[in-house]
Amino acid sequence: MDIQRRFLTLPSGHQVHYRMAGLGPAMILMHPSPSSSEGLVRAMNVFAERFTCIALDTPGYGISDDSVADKTELWGFADVVAQVLDVFGLEDTVIYGAATGAQIGVQFARKYPQRTRLLIMDGAGHFSKEDLVQISDGYFVDLTPRRDGSHLLAAWDASRHLSVFFPWMSERLDQRIQASAAPPESVQHGVNDMLRAGPSYRDAYWQAFQVENNGNASQVTVPTVLAFNTTSIVRPHTEALIELGLPDNFTVVPLDPPTRYAKILEAAAPYTGSPPCPPPPPQTDKHPTLQNIIVEVPGGFLRARGCLEGEGRPLMAIHDPAGSSLLVEPILMPYLGRRPVIAFDNPGNGESDAMIETIASDTYATCLISALHNLGIEEVDVLGRYSGGPVAMEMSFQNPTLVKHIIQTGVSFYEGDKQAWLVENYTPSIAPRWDGRHLLTAWAVMRDQSLYWPWFNQTKDGILWNDGAIDVDLTHLRVVEMLKCGDRYQDAYNAMWTYPMREKLPQLKVPCLLSHPPWEPVAYTTQKALEVEPRCTAKELPPAMADWHRDIDAFLNSS
């Protein structure tokens, strides 16, 4: 099944990320907390046989903006669903919700019954006041970034034990789950979902528990299918919901895992007679702000942060090996409304699909060129952070008419013993381990990058003398983006260390600025590169990224 990824812009200017597949009338799908629409792909592959599936990242989860001001009893989330229908031009829809998504569906059906052709509740139950007391006592962990990285282990503990107890922090035998512990890769996926949502990951999650009861469900008046998965961890709560009695508009459909979605689709079949879903609306609007854009390229989709409003040639920024477009936003912000700007998450980084088998500067370049072509962009000036510099160079080699200027900040020029030293030591594995120790490795690597150069050279000779070196929030952001990469970050760094700058730099046919801020430990590479290619311009940038635009503009205007 061909599943598209896109963003939808609400009237407020906030964006909702969604996945879309299939033909026929619309079905809105909503996920459990703190997951995203990615967790609904299996359901979409079945439901898309008869419906146009639109699977949303709930506001504040996945990569949808946190656009709901009042989250009380999920009414604000229900309003966002109504806004999504408005933007699509839909009068009504089938609603499928799993867990938290089911409770948003309940509130939507109660508030907008005329817009709900069918409600499908999957993973729903009844939680008593006693249940809520237990859940309120420790279910939601504090994800506020801490200097020692211990908040990451708190997320790991919660994610891992969801396969051991329900509620996860329980120690009661009657709440033990009869299943194998989740594999580390699955646990890490859950951790990533929690970290995307951040400390507010509890918002919709906790509100869903509070409205998940028979009294609330019984106020739904539209046709409703209650999917009863007999192997679900919430089975006792689903049984309680049924035993307390449901209105005649409810149909209980018992399920087993192999035929789960096929049975739900069969129950929804009578509601496929509505007009087909309209085509997707534009992804962005005219707000002079950085917005999300999804761009299709061969093999998958790239996420970009950009604002294509303004005059002149777009300025494109390419992030570092383990980062994402979020790390270069401060460079682009001064240009908003003045000139178009865009930054992609490289394939396998951030929120872009991992569609490249061999990670190298030239393969990144090929993918980014394709993305620019699909956006109709014919010329760019390119700023590359660290590994982004070689990628910009490869873009200019592959498409000489596309790239007009290159700005390298943190020049990637490594040779001989220094190169071998970095390749061997810089990127320890962060592959998920059952005990979560890889999270502390990731934290230590990113924290110590601001303390030593290279980070593993923790001798007095490696000290970086920077004031306020440990920025906890920035370290957290970099670790979160690193964890999305996983061990692909090793290949991305190695592509940077081994790039043949001495050979490639003299081949450049476009003006190139070699630059670094004063706090960057690789200033010597700027001088090495200038010695190899004296036609380049060299410049020390101001300490703050937000001030770099002055020197960038001076370079662009003078060449």
Image: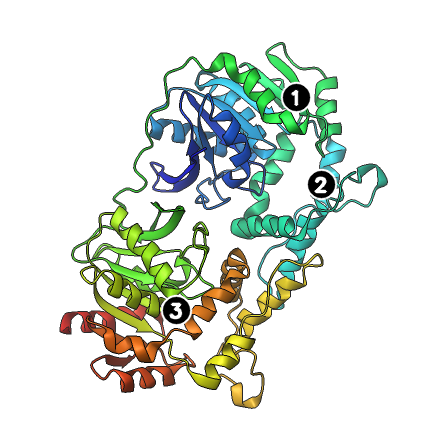
Residue type at tag 1: Gly
* Circle 1 SS class: helix
Q: How is the image coloured?
A: rainbow
The single residue placed furthest to the left in the displayed view is 558
Residue mark closest to the camera, 3 vs 2: 3
Mark 2, Cα crowd under 10 Å, few <14 / some 14-19 / many 20+, is many
Horizontally, residue 303 falls left or right of residue 132, namely left
Q: Between 309 and 278, which is closer to the camera in this rendering?
A: 278
Mark 1 vs mark 2: which is more N-terminal?
2
Residue 108 image position (x, y, % from top left): 50, 25
Horizontally, residue 164 falls left or right of residue 123, namely right
Q: Can you identify the residue that label 3 sits on?
A: 387
- As measured in the structure, the alpha-carbon distance from the residue carrying label 1 to the one carrying label 2 is 19 Å
The single residue placed furthest to the right in the displayed view is 173
Residue type at tag 2: Ile
* Circle 2 SS class: helix
Residue at 22% in and 57% down: 314
- As measured in the structure, the alpha-carbon distance from the residue carrying label 3 to the one carrying label 2 is 45 Å
Q: Can you identify the residue that label 2 sits on?
A: 135
Horizontally, residue 145 falls left or right of residue 127, namely left
User: To which quarter of the image does residue 210 belong?
Assistant: top right
72 vs 524: above or below:
above
User: To which quarter of the image does residue 125 belong?
Assistant: top right
Q: Between 363 and 267, which is closer to the camera in this rendering?
A: 363
**How many numbered dots are placed on residues in this image?**
3
* Circle 3 SS class: loop
Mark 3 vs mark 2: which is more N-terminal?
2
Mark 3 vs mark 1: which is more N-terminal?
1
Q: Can you identify the residue that label 1 sits on?
A: 215
Q: The C terminus appears in which quarter of the rendering?
A: bottom left
Mark 3, Cα crowd under 10 Å, few <14 / some 14-19 / many 20+, is many
CB within 8 Å, label 1 to label 2:
no
